[in-house]
Image (tube, rainbow, N blue to C red):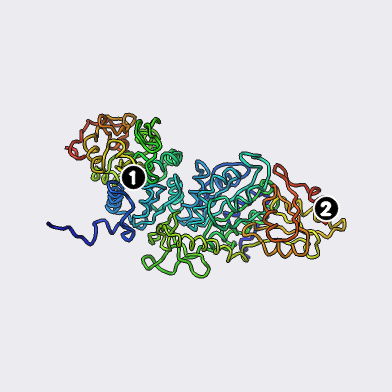
Amino acid sequence: MSEIVSASHPVDSLLRADRLPHIWCPGCGLGSITATYMGALQDSGLPMDKSVVVSGIGCTGRVAGYVDLDSFHTTHGRAIPFATGVKLGNPELQVTVISGDGDLFAIGGNHFLHAARRNLDLLVVCVNNFNYAMTGGQAGPTTPRQAVTSTTPRGATDQPFNLQQLATSLGVSYSARWTALHLRQLRDTFTRAIGLHGFRFVEVLSPCPVGFGKDNGLGEGLDEMEFYRSQGVVDRRITPAMASVEMSRTSPLPLGVFADPDDAGTEWPGSTRITNGGVPS
Amino acid sequence: MTESPSSTNQFMNGDIACAEGALAAGCRLFAGYPITPSTEIAEHLARRLPDVGGVFVQMEDELASMAAVLGGSWGGARAMTATSGPGFSLMQENIGWGMFTETPCVVVDIQRGSPSTGLPTLTSQSDVMQAKWGSHGDYEPVAYAPASPQEMFDLTIRAFNVADRLRQPVFIMSDETVGHMTELVRVAAPGSVPREGRPRPAEPPGDGYLPFRAGADLVPPMVHAGEGYRIHITGLTHTDNGYPSNSAAVHDTLVRRLSAKVLQHAPDLVAVEHLATEDAEVVVVAYGGTSRSARLAVRNARESGIRCGMLRLIGLWPFPSEEIAALGRRANLLVAEGNLGQMAREVERFTDRPVRRVNHGGGHLLLPEVILDAIKEAV
């Protein structure tokens, strides 16, 4: 039986390797998403010394602690206004906010609206795992209706945010949704978003087997990846308003780019049903 | 003959003087949210900052304002916000982040009647203990209480210098009386204002710099985002390299250093004015707008033969405990303030004698005659 032994990981040079292993649970998508972001940033050719990551609080809030960049782990909900200050304090910096759904859209929700309106050069990445995971799996602003969490033991009743509808309604220059499975598309999206100006938004659905998946029929992390594969749909006829995330086996999971500067005034092209792990056939 | 730029004398209110002081100090980012009676500071900087290459940004609330100020500071700018009680409350969590991450910036509170929405247009001094204890956890704030538009100008400059020197947020705890009072202000010539920069590391990037490793003065050198040091800054308890730690020992050491950092510099930070205290039997302790009433009351008391003086607190925090203790050994102390006795309780900690109080809950300044009556009772 062969053993794979490696002294280093391909993305070690982009991370604070002295802080590894990370704190995230088995099956979580945050490691892959973080590595994908850093790979895209490296590809962009932008100087790493001029790139900043700002996070809020929560599992995704810990991303700032692992990237080998100037990075800030701020207060709960305030990553976007903090990043606004960084950008205004030194406009030469490329500033990305990476935080979770609860941080960005519950406690910090108002800042998202106003940062979009302000339209500074900021990229906001939301890792959406449908719950407050750091505190052990409570309902959040994207928790689907009926979902069982520790604070919705009889099923969630509040309507979840459709983040693509929310972002595009604010006129953001770029908005896309992928999953922790669709890492090649996600890398392309990060590359595209990093290269654009104005306020840009990327949502990445991520498995959280411990906090959400196992209680809601999604199983372990790998099972949820299979769910993303089987339910993921890229169909440009799906408008942002239609792109709600049900996380049910009877509903499609709308993915793709929902706003891009090149789309202005053009018709939505035809659909592509993804059936092979997210790669358009 | 060419003249070097000189200072000018201008009539302006305290809020405008504060804004001009910020400009003179090199403030290049103001992030704020309108709130009476501080709004003129934001309005003035909205007009003036672009002319000097700075940025004014109106945020969506005070939480965002404080967060943006902290971010701007790490971006390398001297940054400030201004608010009043309700906004100061909303800023507290991020103020704590600034204390813990040692982020220099200036926060101005033009106090108004409170609690809650209180009296938006009327004066008070009821946030002075909030400046001390407002955010959760142990830290030692630095706060000044200007008593005139001139001091709004001068102490705002001082606040920026202290913030940079100590690497922490510094408060201007003003009040509506002073903020909306118009007087002649000597405005220092551009470039003539002494500037103490942030302590900077000797090491170039990659050569072992640690963002929270402090020397004997307990203030770690500071770098900014974009300078190549690849710093990580967190509101979690952190080791010298900025990385999170779950260690009680690390936490205890860090919290003690942060407090000691300020207390060790207290001799440079404490600021008081003595008015006729040498032979005084009664010393009025007052600050900010109330000290102006107290000054008249002390003068009137002297004219009627009462040996009376005033200790004016120019700095509230760190508290001038030695000055209070010295006066408390030989005089009766009377604390006059626009709240129900917040600083009086602090004064009591440093004297064995009973401390008299004269207070107003907010809405107007304590009148000189009320303070005078209290002085007569205190003899």
Which is more foreground, mark 2 or mark 1?
Answer: 2
Q: Chain of mark 2?
A: B
Answer whether residue A38 is visible to the viewer in this image: yes
In the image, B112: left or right of B371? left
User: Which amino acid is tagged 2?
Assistant: Glu
State whether residue A202 is above or below residue B239: above
Q: Which residue is mark 2?
A: B377
User: Helix, strand, or loop for circle 2?
Assistant: helix
Question: Are dots 2 and 1 in contact, CB under 8 Å?
Answer: no
Packing grade of label 2 (10 A; few <14, some 14-19, many >=20) is: few
- Pick the front one: A217 or B371: A217
Q: Residue at x 64, y 39 (%)?
A: B118
Q: Quadrant of the C terminus of chain A?
A: top left
- Pick the front one: B325 or B368: B325
Label of residue A196 in the image? 1
Q: Residue at x 69, y 43 (%)?
A: B362
Q: Residue at x 59, y 61 (%)?
A: B193
- Pick the front one: B224 or B132: B132
Q: Position of residue A279 (x, y in %)?
A: 19, 40
Q: Position of residue B22 (x, y in %)?
A: 58, 54
Q: Position of residue A45 (x, y in %)?
A: 29, 54
In the image, B219: left or right of B204? right
- Pick the front one: B296 or A50: B296
User: Could you say which quadrant of the image residue A193 lies in?
Assistant: top left
Do the residues at pointers 2 and 1 share their chain? Answer: no
Q: Chain of mark 1?
A: A
Residue sitting at the far right: B304
Q: Quadrant of the N terminus of chain A?
A: bottom left
Distance CA(mark 2)–CA(mark 1)? 72 Å
